[in-house]
Amino acid sequence: MCPLGRFSLFALSYLLLVVTSAWAELPNPVLKSVFPPGGQSGSTIELTVSGTGLDEVSRLICSRSDIASEKIEKNRFRVNIPQNIPAGSYDLRVLCRNGLSSPRTFFVGNRSDVLESEPNETFQSAQTTSLDVSINGRIQKKGDIDLFQFFANQGQSVIIECRAERLDSSLRAILELYDSSGRRLAVNRGFFGIDPLINFKVPADGNYFVKVFDLIYSGSSDHFYRLDIDTGPRMLFTVPAAIQRSTTSLVSIYGWNLGNLKQESNQEIASSNSPEIERRLLELGDVEQKQQQQEKRKDSLSDNEFERLDVTITHPAENYANPFPIRRRSNQADMDGFAFHFANCHAPISIGLTDVPVIRENETHQTPGTAQEIPCPSEISGQLIAGDERDWYAIQARRGEVLWIEAFGQRINSPVDLDVIVMDALAKKTLKQFSDEVKNSEGKKFPSSHLDPAGKWIVPEDGRYLIMIQNIRGGLDDDPRRVYRFSLRRQDPDFHLAVVSHQAEPASLNVRRGGRAVLDVTALRKRGMTDSIRVSANNLPQGIRCPDVWLGPGEDRALLTVTADENALSYWGNLSLTGFSMQSGTKKVRGGTVVRTDLPNGSSRLTTEIPLAVTGEAPFRITADGHEKRKHDLFGEMNIRHAPGSVLDVAVFLDRRNLSDREPVRLKGVGMPDMIQNQTATIPAGKNKGYLSFYLPPYLPVGQYTITVQAQAEVAQKSDTKQKQSLVVFSNPVTFEVKPAAFVVAVDSDAPRKIRRGETIQVKYSAKRVNGFINKIHTELEAADKLDGLRVRGVTFVGQSDQGTLQIIANDDAPLGKQPFIRLSAVGVVEDQPVYHGSCFLDLEITE
């Protein structure tokens, strides 16, 4: 057996597998199905993988390094799951000729595992199973229905849960429960998101049937699921939902069948220190008594009573390294937490982490007059059990204070849509209302938007203020699952980073030798964080380079470029990334993946690692340089100082390799800061150098920025040179610093836009001084490369003059058409030395 390892960073030679055309596009390996999608700890199973682009699969790789496998057939593996593997979700990938595949979730359980057996579409053919099992099944075709039969005794609490979405499955599962006469007893269409669960209190001894099917009766090999029919302990949620770092906290765990829970002895999962556990299991009678004491508050969900277990917990150490065994959506990337286990519980539960004290809500704060006084900073943990419940809090604040308010509901898997309102002390005037977070920098590919409110409020006057929290989704029934976190903090900047493949479909980071691959970096900024963020790679293996990139002030996106040298060994491993800002320090970068592309709002999640493979060879290559010296008629060679109101020229060098000299190459910027307009250009056939030029607007904040150049060309295939395919490659990152401007150049709005060959035109312009600059400004007409067919006499401003006219002459043989990237280029002089630069594009077309 070979370890399914953690992509440890060492070169792995699988050269014999990498037999690719030097200029054929490598298919993107997409892992669509792993079946069975889970297994029991302490067992050995046989597993089949399927997907697209999975040519010559050689290895199965898991984020949990002590799971091992051996290949037994083409796409089939024997997998050994050690007894000590904690229950939870882990990532599986395959290594194939085309590199590493996208991941699929694999669930390790601690119940007996069973495979679905067909036919089982009717009550007569229902598959018989015992209790306390996990059934691995598939809805194989349209209209398929799976039925299972089990025997249970009166009074048992049987939990029937279907995992599908949480396994990256295409199944939109529906659960139905029937008695032996065929009468439907229960149905559920979604409990954990869209994954259904039924808590069944057995009314009488007998046989019962569970039906699994798709909401729209679709089906395929990708519609897999894992069905639990279980009487064991099941944790659902905690109060509080988060604890403070470096503290020991009393946490109430809510769930079912909690009476026989025992502490998880595996320290790496439970906590870094053995938690002292106080068991207080509340029986139904205790719950009823608690309801009377707490003004209609109750620990019940319709007829499904929750049990409660109080546990004292110390969170894991900050260097806790094992994979987080709980699936997390992309919009949870800005949250910290850890997984808490009990040895005989079916799965871990997530508990959040915060830097500020955590306060539990009072039981009587549902009116303005009973508002709970809270300090700042703090985090409140509460429940909106009743559908129309409102929780009130009171704060003392001083005029001009900037307070940041954030609530967590959807992101902690609570069935709420929260609304937060700040009011005056008498609750008569609304001062600020916070609703859904709609910002979504990566769009459908890696959505970060959610239903949780967040934002800042500037205190208008010294005094007392009220904050009201409500669930606008409401509901007729009481539901203790309506848990929330409410954070009240001052301006304390923070950020989180996540990366996902630049491709629009599920993908890993596969880099060709002599080529580059890119990841999209997303920054989730919090509490006024506007600083530049530097992203760096750590402990790279030989032959792989990953230059630092910068997300400029306030920017949420950038591209990270990974380069493999020409002689890099075939390799698979992990990319370790960190982000740093002066405001918030260093943060680890989280990995992400697209799960599905066929949903209107996207489907993406976090991954436990950022995998990387080197395979194949790049068909051609570009190198970008944003710091070329410029030649000036008066000042000679100059280093360009970039400032708001100037032009960034990026020289692009083309190594054609197997690309024909007859092929033009199209260029454009990618990973562009929001305030910089993108541009396109073409390196003509027969040429190996071109330019992309970008205008840095006057309102661009100073700071560090990074952009990347994308090149696209039509490449002949080796097998048939008449057949061509479009290939895309990326440049190295271009990082530049924007410094304060000394002046801003602008062309007059009435300036001519056309010039005929042999004609002379006058172009009025201004160069307004800023930031106290008073010296000379000399202005010329320039282009990114060379000015072709146009002549101009430069103008120098002295004293306080800031307006002038350039006289432009078109030669008789000047090239016709739009002139790309020509600009009015100004140089600010200090003691006769060129120090400051400012430019603006001139939209000019040469005609006959």
Image: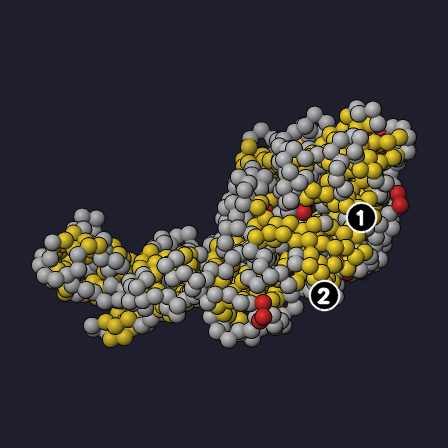
The quarter of the rendered structure image containing the C terminus is bottom left
Marks 1 and 2, the one that precedes in the sequence = 2
- Residue at 65% x, 42% y is 223
Residue 458 vs 613, above or below: the answer is above
Q: Assess disc 2: are there few (<14), some (14-19) or many (≥20) residues with their C-alpha within 10 Å of its C-alpha.
A: some
Left or right of 703? Residue 289 is right
Q: Position of residue 749 (x, y in %)?
A: 21, 48
Q: CA distance from mark 1 to mark 2?
A: 22 Å
- Residue at 76% x, 36% y is 120
- Residue at 53% x, 71% y is 544
Left or right of 250? Residue 433 is left
* Residue 603 seen in this snapshot: yes
**Amino acid residing under circle 1:** Asp
Most extreme residue toward the front, as rendered?
720
Q: Which mark is residue 292?
A: none
Q: Position of residue 598 (x, y in %)?
A: 54, 42
Q: Assess disc 1: are there few (<14), some (14-19) or many (≥20) residues with their C-alpha within 10 Å of its C-alpha.
A: many
**Amino acid residing under circle 2:** Pro
- Residue at 53% x, 39% y is 600
The quarter of the rendered structure image containing the N terminus is bottom right
The kind of secondary structure element at disc 2 is strand
Q: Position of residue 515 (x, y in %)?
A: 46, 67
Looking at this view, is 687 or 166 the one in front?
A: 687
Say how the picture is coloured. Answer: secondary structure
Residue 725 falls in which quadrant of the image?
Answer: bottom left
Looking at this view, is 401 or 407 the one in front?
A: 407
Looking at this view, is 461 or 729 the one in front?
A: 729
Looking at this view, is 546 or 53 the one in front?
A: 53
Residue 381 falls in which quadrant of the image?
Answer: top right
Please give the residue where the numbered disc 1 appears in the rendered image: 113
Please give the residue where the numbered disc 2 appears in the rendered image: 3
The kind of secondary structure element at disc 1 is strand
